[in-house]
Amino acid sequence: MSKKENDGNLGKIQNLVIFKTKEDSRSEVIDKYTFEKVDQEDKIKLHNELEPYSGHFRYSILIDNQSLASITEMKIKIKYPEFLTLIRCFPPTINIPQAITEKDTKQIKLEFDELNEKSKIQIHLHFTPNILDKVGEIRTIVTYVNNKDTVRVLDSRPAEIIIDSITIEPKVVPSSFIRKFSQQPGIKNVIKSMGIGIEHQIPSEIYYHILEQSFLFHKFQLVAKDVEKRILWYFGTESKIKQDLLAIGQIVSNKIEIIASSLNPYLLVSFLTLFSNDFKERLLMNGIVNSKNLIYDLECKHCGAVLPYFPNKGEAVECTNCKYEQKIW
């Protein structure tokens, strides 16, 4: 029994005339709470947002219970285009089920038992494109049971996602320009780190040569190279939007890494998609791997940070950012 009900019963036992004013005051509070229950569904809000984030896209979902009662049996359905791959979820404790594919759309479903009064659930889904020149939508539908045991539905506005194709034009800059470009206000930096899951060792100069071929094929201008340290610096301008792009390829700690800098975060997503796809195709053509499934992204499954090295098969590697241990292959 609640404190309010206890107080109410005490008032009835005692002299009702003497305590009449106090009882009326408490009745007003109870009526106010009852009114809150009636329009609870108007105080359950759904917000979504899509933005480029660290070389891919982050889709954020916020469910906000602004009422004074909890909701239960929450089911969240997220539909997204087939050209996107879900790579990570935050918080990482959420269990992501296998996506269901229907025509050109994928779908996942999340479930939560309860969302308490005056509380929120924030979910971030991280998607990476697998192809360029595509347009699609991401949409969220939430169903829940309110305090009157009635099912309610929240439908988000569709978030449009556009993956533009890009064409690079070479741009000649001095090597001294690299630091200045990388440190200008508003610059965005992204990194794609990969490990090759094969039993036999491949000399690093072979990967280095394939990286060089990819940069030249996409018409980047060579700025500098360090053969001994296995680093390449290239520069270019996207032909349509006229945005500059600094791209670096390097072999380090048994990893192949592509690093890019630009003021335009959408350009960075398109570039990493284009270049990593081309690099993987070249590994296939050169007989380094016989399947793209043997090329692993070295991004922490827990926090998304780049892993410090590519481990041996069956060996766990610890993320230097969040200390989470994981096996890659």
Image (tube, rainbow, N blue to C red):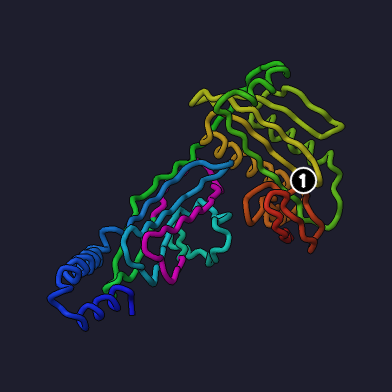
Q: Can residue 284 be seen from the camera position used here?
A: no
Q: Position of residue 55 (x, y in %)?
A: 58, 41
Q: Is residue 126 magenta?
A: yes
Secondary structure under the numbered disc 1 in the rendered image: strand
Instruction: Look at 75% across and 30% down and name the residue there.
Output: 232
Q: Position of residue 9 (x, y in %)?
A: 24, 80
Q: Provide the residue designation for mark 1.
A: 255
Q: Position of residue 51 (x, y in %)?
A: 47, 42
Q: In the picture, which quadrant includes the N terminus?
A: bottom left
| Rendered view: 162 above or below 31 | above
Three-letter amino acid code at the position of disc 1: Lys
Q: Is residue 129 left or right of residue 147?
A: right
Instruction: Look at 27% across and 75% down and name the residue there.
Output: 7
| Rendered view: 92 above or below 162 | below
Instruction: Look at 84% across and 30% down and name the residue there.
Output: 227
Residue 4 vs residue 189, the one in the foreground: 4
Q: Position of residue 113 (x, y in %)?
A: 43, 71
Q: Can residue 138 be seen from the camera position used here?
A: yes
Question: Which residues are drawn in magenta?
Answer: 110-139
- Examine the image and state in which quarter residue 116 appears: bottom left
Q: Is residue 119 left or right of residue 176?
A: left
